[in-house]
Amino acid sequence: MDEIVEAALRKWPNVPHCHGWLALDARGNWYLRDERAQAAGPFPAVRGSRVEHEKLLAFIGRNYAADGEGAWYFQNGPQRVYVELEAAPWVWRLDARGGVESHTGRAARVESVWLDEQGRLFLATDLGCGIVHTLDMEAASEAIESGRWQPRELAFAAMPGRFGYRLKPARAGG
């Protein structure tokens, strides 16, 4: 977490949490969901405005974490902004050498491999569970065909419970 964020937390420890304003799709894109987007429908049916500013993306990535209940958030200064997830808290990118990196640029070590009923590939890693980016399915298929990865089947609805994350964090009190 950035030092400036930690300092803001110390200075203003009781800022209310924010829900519904930030979302992560299955390709690692962040979306801001203002009141109009929220009123138009739930994520991912209505996405909102895609975040494209490089420094903001880097700031979100450095300050992205999970609470003890499996809800993921971006710590924006003193305010915790909970994230709605389309598929999982991480989106994995694969490189030609077999490395795995998150959509936020963090390296990960694969612990198990999972396939849902839609044919989407998920990796459980030392950082947590995430979906493999669609552009990296060829590299993933090579890891499977070579025997490096042996996927097991698991229904998508069971993924959050199995790996301890929440797709849509609830507001306190409901």
Image: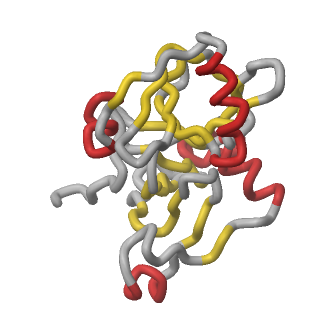
Q: How many marks?
A: 0
Where does residue 135 sit, x and y in percent of width and height?
A: 71, 47
Q: Quadrant of the C terminus?
A: bottom left
Q: Residue 73 or 91: which is nearer the viewer? A: 91
Residue at 76% x, 48% y: name it: 58
Figure check: 55 above or below 133: below
State whether residue 67 appears in this view.
Answer: yes
Residue at 38% x, 39% y: name it: 116
Q: Quadrant of the N terminus?
A: top right
Q: Residue furthest top?
A: 147
Figure check: 127 above or below 81: above
Where does residue 20 sit, x and y in percent of width and height?
A: 41, 67
Q: Residue furthest front?
A: 145
Figure check: 132 above or below 18: above
Query: Which of the colour schemes (rainbow, by chain, secondary structure, one colour) is used?
Result: secondary structure
Where does residue 50 sit, x and y in percent of width and height?
A: 66, 70
